[in-house]
């Protein structure tokens, strides 16, 4: 199972720093554009002309590549800012939903794992005492049945590990959506 953890403040700081780096690179590239392009040969012989032409071609390629890098950099910064704003908005929406819930509408969805597809009261109480009691003592515990059928312990399961995990995540997602649609806060 993968988790996504974001820090909108850290993302904003990174975006600001990246914008500063982009500005510095842009200024540097602009400063070297004149002296490196349009190089004049130091003499009129064919070797000097060819070397100057080659240096000018390299300088023009550098400027073209720098322009592409600048475009990519600006797009990356914009994407980072957009992602930061999206995460911040999502967190604000979730916080508002959690604050609007009342004490009796708070539930903790407890899922079992392999060998425990239907968590019993003892298991749920141990989860509550170990993880929820300090901050979420007023939450009602709700058991969610998962599909693994004691697989791989018994070998009786009809689902592979991947399918079992996918079905478990779908079960959890459905339960969260159902509970939040009913105005309940979920943990």
Image: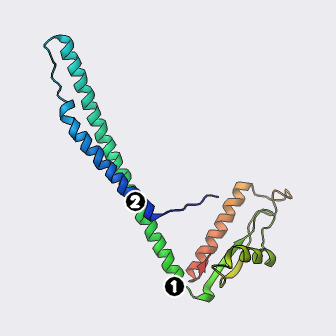
Residue closer to the observer: 39 or 111: 39
Q: Position of residue 30 (x, y in %)?
A: 22, 41
Residue occupying image coordinates x 52% and y 83%: 99
- Residue for badge 1: 100
User: For the view shown, which residue lies furthest in the left direction?
Assistant: 44
- For this view, does 51 lie left or right of residue 81? left
38 in relation to 112, above or below: above
37 in relation to 186, above or below: above
Answer with the quarter of the image where residue 136 lies: bottom right
Residue closer to the observer: 109 or 126: 126
- Residue for badge 2: 13
Real-space CA distance between mark 1 and mark 2, rounded to the nearest whole angstrom: 31 Å
Residue occupying image coordinates x 18% and y 16%: 49
Answer with the quarter of the image where residue 182 lies: bottom right
Residue occupying image coordinates x 25% and y 30%: 59
Q: Earlier in the sequence, mark 1 or mark 2?
A: 2
- For this view, does 125 lie left or right of residue 153? left
Q: Position of residue 92 (x, y in %)?
A: 46, 74
SS type, badge 2: helix
SS type, badge 1: helix
Q: Position of residue 42 (x, y in %)?
A: 15, 18
Mark 2 Cα shell of 10 Å, populated few (<14), some (14-19), many (≥20): few
- Quadrant assignment for the C terminus: bottom right
154 in relation to 121, above or below: above
Q: Nearer the viewer, mark 1 or mark 2?
A: 2
User: For the view shown, which residue lies furthest in the right direction?
Assistant: 154
- Quadrant assignment for the N terminus: bottom right
Residue closer to the observer: 88 or 164: 88
Q: Position of residue 118 (x, y in %)?
A: 78, 71
Residue occupying image coordinates x 35% and y 57%: 16
């Amino acid at each position: 199972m993968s988790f996504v953890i974001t820090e909108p403040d850290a993302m904003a700081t990174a975006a600001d720093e990246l914008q500063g780096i982009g500005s510095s690179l842009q200024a540097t590239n602009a400063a070297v554009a004149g002296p490196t392009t349009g190089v004049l040969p130091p003499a009129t012989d064919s070797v000097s002309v060819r070397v100057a032409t080659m240096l000018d071609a390299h300088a023009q390629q550098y400027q073209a590549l720098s322009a592409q890098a600048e475009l990519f950099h600006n797009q990356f910064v914009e994407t980072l800012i957009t992602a930061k704003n999206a995460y911040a908005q999502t967190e604000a929406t979730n916080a508002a939903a959690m604050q609007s819930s009342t004490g009796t509408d708070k539930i903790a969805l407890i899922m079992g794992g392999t060998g425990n597809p239907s968590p019993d009261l003892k298991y749920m109480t141990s989860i509550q005492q170990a993880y929820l009691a300090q901050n979420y003592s007023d939450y009602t515990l709700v058991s969610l049945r998962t599909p693994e059928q004691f697989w791989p312990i018994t070998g009786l399961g009809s689902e592979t590990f991947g399918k079992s995990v996918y079905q478990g995540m779908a079960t959890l997602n459905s339960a969260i959506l159902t509970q939040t649609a009913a105005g309940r806060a979920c943990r």
